[in-house]
C-alpha cells in the first residue's frame, strides 16, 4: 500500500466512517472522530473530557468499570486480540444502540496501561432484524 506518510494516521482516524474513541486510564474520553460524532450524536467538543459514561447505559456501568479498572491495573483483558465485542450503548438523544467493537490497548514505555481505543460500528439494524426473526421463528414452533 503506497500512501503519503505525512498525516496518514491522523487522517485515517479522523475520517474513518467507523467510530474511533480513545479513553485514558481513568476512562476519560480523549479522542473522538467523525465516525463517533455520527454514531453517538455528540460533537467532539461535547465528548472529549467526559467520562465514557456518556455512551454507556446506566445498567451496564458497574460491570464496565470493574473490567476497565482491572485492565488498567493489570494490562490484561479477557478479550482476545481482535475479538469483536457486542454491547448496548447510548446515543445523545437517549436511544439505545447495539454496537460492535474491537479494542486497542495503549501502554507507556514501561508497559503500564495508559488507555484504550475502540473501533466501533453500529449494529443496531442487524440486531433488530435478528430479534424480529427469532420472535417470528418462536411463533412458528409447535408447542
Image: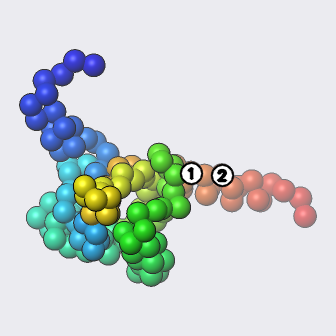
67 up-or-down from 139: above or below: below
Mark 2 residue element: helix
Residue 125 vs residue 118, the one in the foreground: 118
Mark 1 residue element: helix
Percent coordinates x, y for residue 18 in the rendering: 32, 45
Asked whether residue 123 appears in the rendered view, the answer is no
- Residue holding disc 2: 133
In the image: residue 131, left or right of residue 24: right
Q: How is the image coloured?
A: rainbow
Residue 78 vs residue 97, the one in the foreground: 78
Residue 98 vs residue 107, the one in the foreground: 107
Quarter location, residue 47: bottom left
- Residue holding disc 1: 129
113 up-or-down from 27: above or below: above
Quarter location, residue 41: bottom left
For disc 2, the neighbor class at 10 Å (few under 14, some 14 to 19, many from 20) is few
The image quadrant where one finds the C terminus is bottom right
Q: Residue furthest top?
A: 2
Percent coordinates x, y for residue 85 in the rendering: 49, 55
In the image: residue 6, left or right of residue 27: left
Name the mark on residue 20: none
Percent coordinates x, y for residue 86 in the rendering: 50, 57
Query: Real-space Cα distance between discs 2 and 1?
Result: 6 Å
**Which residue is painted at 76% across and 59% down in the image?**
138
**Which residue is painted at 18% across and 22% down in the image?**
3
Asked whether residue 11 appears in the rendered view, the answer is yes
**Which residue is painted at 28% across and 51% down in the image?**
20
Quarter location, residue 142: bottom right
State yes or no: discs 2 and 1 in contact (Cβ < 8 Å): yes
In the image: residue 28, left or right of residue 56: left
The image quadrant where one finds the N terminus is top left
Amino acid at each position: 500500500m503506497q500512501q503519503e506518510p505525512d498525516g496518514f494516521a491522523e487522517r485515517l482516524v479522523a475520517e474513518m466512517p467507523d467510530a474511533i474513541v480513545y479513553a485514558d486510564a481513568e476512562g476519560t474520553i480523549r479522542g473522538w472522530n467523525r465516525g463517533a460524532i455520527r454514531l453517538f450524536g455528540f460533537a467532539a467538543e461535547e465528548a472529549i473530557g467526559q467520562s465514557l459514561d456518556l455512551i454507556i447505559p446506566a445498567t451496564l456501568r458497574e460491570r464496565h468499570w470493574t473490567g476497565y479498572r482491572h485492565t488498567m491495573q493489570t494490562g490484561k483483558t479477557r478479550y482476545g486480540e481482535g475479538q469483536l465485542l457486542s454491547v448496548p450503548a447510548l446515543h445523545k438523544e437517549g436511544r439505545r444502540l447495539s454496537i460492535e467493537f474491537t479494542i486497542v490497548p495503549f501502554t507507556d514505555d514501561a508497559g503500564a496501561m495508559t488507555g484504550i481505543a475502540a473501533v466501533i460500528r453500529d449494529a443496531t439494524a442487524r440486531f433488530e432484524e435478528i430479534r424480529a426473526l427469532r420472535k417470528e421463528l418462536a411463533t412458528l414452533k409447535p408447542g
